[in-house]
Image (cartoon, grey):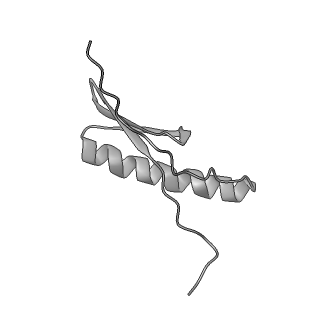
């Protein structure tokens, strides 16, 4: 079975918080979640992304393209 969906890549950002980790998509900041562990946060962020895509499809909205580029910048402080 074939469908008309394309594969996209999104960039997740994870921050340590007192209750575990907060995860958010860099290229779609409305997709955000929290998990007790980094692995749980990754899974929940992927679930949140699927739900957001489904909601956007249902509402006829355009899905953000994704593919943000991140790099670490070193500086002496």
Identify the residue at image location x=26%, y=42%. 38
- The quadrant of the image that shows the N terminus is bottom right
Identify the residue at image location x=24%, y=40%. 37
Question: Closest to the observer: 60 or 27?
Answer: 27
Q: Position of residue 50 (x, y in %)?
A: 51, 56
Q: Position of residue 12 (x, y in %)?
A: 41, 44
Question: Closest to the observer: 21 or 28?
Answer: 28
How many numbered dots are placed on residues in this image? 0
Which corner quadrant of the image does residue 58 belong to?
bottom right
Identify the residue at image location x=35%, y=52%. 43
Q: Does residue 8 appear left or right of residue 21 in this picture?
A: right
Q: Does residue 45 appear left or right of residue 17 in this picture?
A: right
In the picture as drawn, the residue positioned furthest to the bottom comes out as 1
- The quadrant of the image that shows the C terminus is top left
Measured along the vertical axis of the image, is residue 3 above or below residue 8?
below
Q: Does residue 60 appear left or right of residue 32 in this picture?
A: right
Q: Position of residue 28 (x, y in %)?
A: 56, 42
Identify the residue at image location x=42%, y=53%. 46
In the picture as drawn, the residue positioned furthest to the top comes out as 77
Q: Position of residue 75 (x, y in %)?
A: 30, 20
């Amino acid at each position: 079975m074939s469908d008309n969906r394309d594969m996209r890549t999104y960039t997740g950002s994870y921050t340590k918080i007192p209750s575990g980790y907060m995860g958010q998509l860099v290229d779609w900041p409305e997709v955000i979640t929290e998990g007790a562990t980094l692995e749980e946060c990754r899974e929940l962020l992927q679930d949140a992304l699927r739900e957001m895509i489904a909601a956007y499809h249902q509402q006829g909205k355009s899905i953000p393209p994704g593919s943000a580029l991140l790099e670490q910048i070193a500086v002496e402080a």
